[in-house]
Image (cartoon, coloured by chain):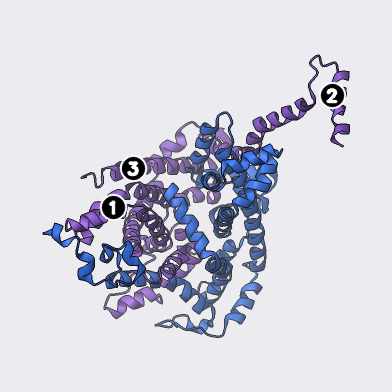
Chain colours: A purple, B blue
């Protein structure tokens, strides 16, 4: 049957006047060579097509827009150079948002990563019910941030919240979680910690299991206590992983949005005096509430810059950490 | 002194000699969990589970508990009436939110897995020009914060006439750099080169190899990616908040609207959050081993 089919393409080619008569297998070989050459690009093209339209283009578009005074409602759209940026640097609401974001970022990230290390170290022992512990610690990640924020906002209610009630049992006066600047940061940070500690613990656990056990045995023979082993072996060996989690937390922390928005009953102004408005909320507010899209775009670029700067700071800090080896 | 203590540690602890662990356990005591370890983990477990537990408890109570101190810790019988009120609440469009979320999350999951396995296969097993540079751009895309896109995407959706439509929250998420990277790592170790060569000798085209050889071999990892993607999309908040209208929300927006309207009667809000969370919780409990394995595997490689 195959014999009947094969000559056909050869004949067609001959008619077209091709000077080099390709042998029977030629067409197929060429097709397969073409397949090997082209298919890889076809396989990766959907990624790049979607990324070009919905990833790369918006990135440049934001940059271009941040140089303009752009309003959607009035249709105003003119080039103003770097004025949005110079204005931002003198904008007290923006600076307030930066301080809030950095404050919450620090008080959320540092305890979170330390707790995760502690939990991972505990999970790395020979344990009964280790699966139960792992599953339980992942539970927060499954719960949506919106649900978490709603539940915790209730827990941190000033008058009827469980947290203030518990504090009352040990004789602490009720705390104004929403209206006090510092305490609102703490409450929001607790939400972030609750969600991400278990996830980071699992990542640390994975890395800990890759540390050769003889290191610990040798240290134990030399008389190093468990605590000492933790700080002298585990933590230094985990440095790349700690760096990874610190940078992921930086990217997440500087974009903090859902928790504080829900803590404010769904508004983006961050409390009565903006005491917990984050940069992301300020961006949202500028663009969508104040119809100042160019200004919002400039804020978006500032978030990106902050992420880059703080990722680098993390990188240098963690490279130095435990450098005594 | 320490040198002497070493070799006879296992004996002095009297570690059960009949246990198979003894073979590896010259220093068995080193790995044994102490009571303090258990206490740490149990505290961690309780703190992890309590808010979810409490959410479900409150969802089953009537609004007479609002302001009760201490709040109830055991379920009541009001879940049904709370839910019917949630679904009836006009401000929330809750049923619509659920359906919309299911559509969006399914569409995003299917395409993410499909495109990630395709690209992952190409990056892991095929040779082509510019491969390394292209792979580097995939990794770089993971660094771009979502927020960079919110304002321009909003304006673009206006150009396309998609403002408030579901495609505006589907299309930007059809791909993830993370997915491509994860599938590349997995393909490298799960699909032997010989298998692909054999398929080629048999005359399979590259796409045929992808579909009949690679994709089946990737099923476990693709499943994990699918679950993670579904959960993430289901829980997405910021971009839907910008892109959609209150009348055509995802379920997370419905909850925000419920919360705005009923924050004094939070039993209703909690009933809503419970409904929005329960499907994911069930899926997670069933597939938790795979999901945790996937996260840990990804972490080691990263």
Task: For residue A46, say whether it is visible.
Answer: no
Residue behind mark 3: A315
Say which label, 1 or 2, has the lower sequence index: 2
Task: For residue A150, say whether it is visible.
Answer: yes
Do callouts 1 and 2 point to residues on the same chain? yes
Q: Quadrant of residue A133?
A: bottom left
Number of marks in the rendered image: 3
Q: Label 3 to label 2, Cα distance in Å?
A: 63 Å
Residue drawn at x 67%, y 51% is B167
Q: On screen, B15 above or below B183? A: below
Tag 1 near tag 3, CB within 8 Å: no
Label 1's element?
helix
Residue behind mark 2: A10
Q: Position of residue B235 (x, y in %)?
A: 55, 60
Left-right relation of A206 to B231: left
Say which label, 3 or 2, has the lower sequence index: 2
Query: Which chain hosts label 3?
Result: A
Q: Quadrant of residue A263?
A: bottom left
Residue behind mark 1: A235
Q: Quadrant of residue A155?
A: bottom left
Q: Nearer the viewer, mark 1 or mark 2?
A: 2
Q: Position of residue B4 (x, y in %)?
A: 14, 60
Q: Label 1 to label 2, Cα distance in Å?
A: 69 Å
Query: Which chain hosts label 2?
Result: A
Residue A288 or residue A251, whichever sits in front? A251
Q: Residue furthest left?
A: B1
Say which label, 1 or 3, has the lower sequence index: 1
Residue drawn at x 32%, y 52% is A212
Do callouts 1 and 3 point to residues on the same chain? yes
Residue drawn at x 19%, y 57% is A221
Q: Position of residue A175 (x, y in %)?
A: 33, 70
């Amino acid at each position: 049957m195959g014999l009947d089919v094969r000559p056909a393409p050869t004949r067609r080619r001959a008619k077209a006047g091709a000077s080099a008569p390709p042998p029977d297998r030629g067409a197929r070989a060429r097709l397969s060579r073409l397949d090997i050459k082209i298919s890889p690009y076809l396989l990766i093209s959907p990624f790049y097509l979607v990324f070009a339209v919905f990833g790369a283009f918006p990135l440049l578009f934001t940059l271009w827009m941040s140089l303009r005074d752009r309003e959607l409602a009035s249709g105003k759209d003119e080039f103003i150079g770097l004025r949005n940026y110079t204005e931002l640097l003198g904008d007290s609401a923006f600076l307030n948002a930066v301080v809030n974001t950095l404050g919450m970022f620090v008080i959320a990230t540092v305890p979170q990563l330390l707790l995760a290390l502690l939990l991972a170290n505990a999970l790395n022992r020979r344990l009964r019910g280790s699966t139960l512990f792992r599953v339980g610690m992942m539970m927060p990640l499954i719960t949506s941030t919106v649900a978490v924020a709603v539940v915790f906002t209730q827990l941190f209610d000033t008058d009827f919240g469980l947290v203030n009630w518990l504090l009352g049992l040990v004789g602490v006066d009720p705390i104004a979680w929403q209206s006090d600047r510092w305490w609102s940061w703490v409450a929001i940070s607790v939400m972030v910690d609750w969600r991400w500690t278990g996830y980071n613990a699992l990542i640390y656990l994975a890395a800990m299991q890759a540390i050769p056990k003889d290191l610990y045995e040798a240290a134990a023979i030399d008389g190093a206590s468990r605590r000492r082993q933790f700080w002298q072996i585990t933590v230094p060996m985990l440095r790349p992983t700690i760096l990874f989690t610190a940078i992921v937390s930086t990217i997440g922390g500087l974009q903090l949005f859902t928790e504080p928005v829900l803590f404010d009953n769904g508004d983006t102004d961050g409390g009565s005096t903006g005491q917990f408005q984050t940069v992301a909320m300020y961006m949202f507010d500028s663009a969508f509430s104040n119809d100042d899209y160019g200004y919002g775009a400039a804020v978006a670029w500032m978030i990106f810059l902050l992420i880059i700067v703080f990722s680098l700071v993390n990188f240098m800090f963690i490279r130095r950490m435990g450098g005594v080896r | 002194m320490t040198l002497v203590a070493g070799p006879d540690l296992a004996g002095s602890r009297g570690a059960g000699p009949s246990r198979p662990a003894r073979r590896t356990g010259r220093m068995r005591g080193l790995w044994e969990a102490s009571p303090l370890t258990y206490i740490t983990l149990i505290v961690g477990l309780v703190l992890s589970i309590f808010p979810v537990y409490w959410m479900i408890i409150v969802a089953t109570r009537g609004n007479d508990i609002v302001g009760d101190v201490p709040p109830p810790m055991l379920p009541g019988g009001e879940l049904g009436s709370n839910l019917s009120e949630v679904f009836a609440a006009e401000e929330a469009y809750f049923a619509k939110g659920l359906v919309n979320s299911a559509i969006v999350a399914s569409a995003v999951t299917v395409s993410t897995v499909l495109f990630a396995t395709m690209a992952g296969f190409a990056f892991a097993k095929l040779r082509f020009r510019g491969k390394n540079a292209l792979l580097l751009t995939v990794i770089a895309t993971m660094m771009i914060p979502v927020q960079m896109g919110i304002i321009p995407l909003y304006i673009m959706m206006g150009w396309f006439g998609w403002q408030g439509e579901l495609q505006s929250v589907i299309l930007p998420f059809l791909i993830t750099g993370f997915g491509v990277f994860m599938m590349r790592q997995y393909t490298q170790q799960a699909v032997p080169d010989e298998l692909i060569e054999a398929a080629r000798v048999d005359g399979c085209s590259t796409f045929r190899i992808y579909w009949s050889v690679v994709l089946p071999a990737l099923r476990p990892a693709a499943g994990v990616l699918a679950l993670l993607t579904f959960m993430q999309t289901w829980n997405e908040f910021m971009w839907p908040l910008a892109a959609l209208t209150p009348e055509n929300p995802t379920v997370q927006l419905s909850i925000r609207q419920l919360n705005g309207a009923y924050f004094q009667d939070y039993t209703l809000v909690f009933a809503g959050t419970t409904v929005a969370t329960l499907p994911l919780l069930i899926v997670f409990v069933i597939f938790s081993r795979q999901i945790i394995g996937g996260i840990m595997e990804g972490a080691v490689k990263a």
